Amino acid sequence: MGLQIDKFCEDLRLKLTNIESGLHSLKTKMEGKAQQGEQEVRNHLDTIQRRIAQDHAKASAARAEIKAWFDNKKTVTAEKIADWKAKREMSHLQNRADQAERYAQASIDVALTALDEAEQATLEAWLAREDSNSAKSK
């Protein structure tokens, strides 16, 4: 599980670094040339939307895995776990550990998808504000 946490931290760091770098680059271009900057934002937004669409099935499966974990968690009580441990029912304990790891990975997948969606929302908000500002100046 320690390796899984390390991988999550690294994936999260890389995702945030890529988002920060991309947005910083776009900001620089937007400040330089408004018309060209807007096109750069639209191009970047298209890339993000394609990535979100490509990862849609994975995100849906991850959300289903999270739901399954919570549904199962309602039936597996602390007493039941203690009983499995006392009786050394390794198959039940191992199955629960496997499910917990799948739940953790699914949560990571949902978190990374949420970052893409947040980046998309940020760019859409900027474009909407630009539409408003350009209509005002005409």
Image: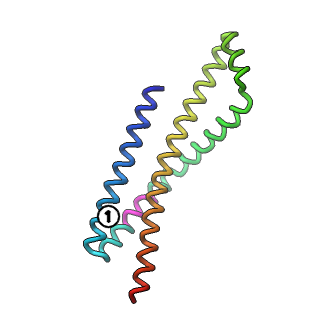
Name the dominant secondary structure of the magenta segment: helix
- Tell which residue pokes out farthest to the bottom in this image: 138
Left or right, 121 with respect to 62, comes to: left
Residue 99 falls in image quadrant:
top right
Give percent across and percent down for residue 103: 58, 35
Give percent across and percent down for residue 24: 31, 59
Residue 37 falls in image quadrant:
bottom left
Q: The C terminus is located in which quarter?
A: bottom left
Q: Nearer the viewer, residue 38 or 79?
A: 79
Name the residue rendered at 60%, 20% in the picture: 94
In the displayed structure, would residue 29 be above or below residue 138? Answer: above
| Amino acid at dot 1 | Leu
Q: Which residues are magenta?
A: 43-50
Left or right, 75 with respect to 67, comes to: right
Q: Which residue is mark 1?
A: 26
Q: Nearer the viewer, residue 86 or 89?
A: 86
Give percent across and percent down for residue 87: 70, 10
Name the residue rendered at 43%, 85% in the picture: 135
Give percent across and percent down for residue 79: 73, 20
Query: Label 1: how many residues lie within 10 Å, few (<14), some (14-19) or many (20+)?
Result: some
- Tell which residue pokes out farthest to the left in this image: 32
In the displayed structure, would residue 3 be above or below residue 87? Answer: below
Q: Is residue 45 magenta?
A: yes
Q: Secondary structure at mark 1?
A: helix
Left or right, 109 with respect to 9, comes to: right
Name the residue rendered at 70%, 32% in the picture: 72
Q: Is residue 59 magenta?
A: no
Q: Nearer the viewer, residue 103 or 56?
A: 103
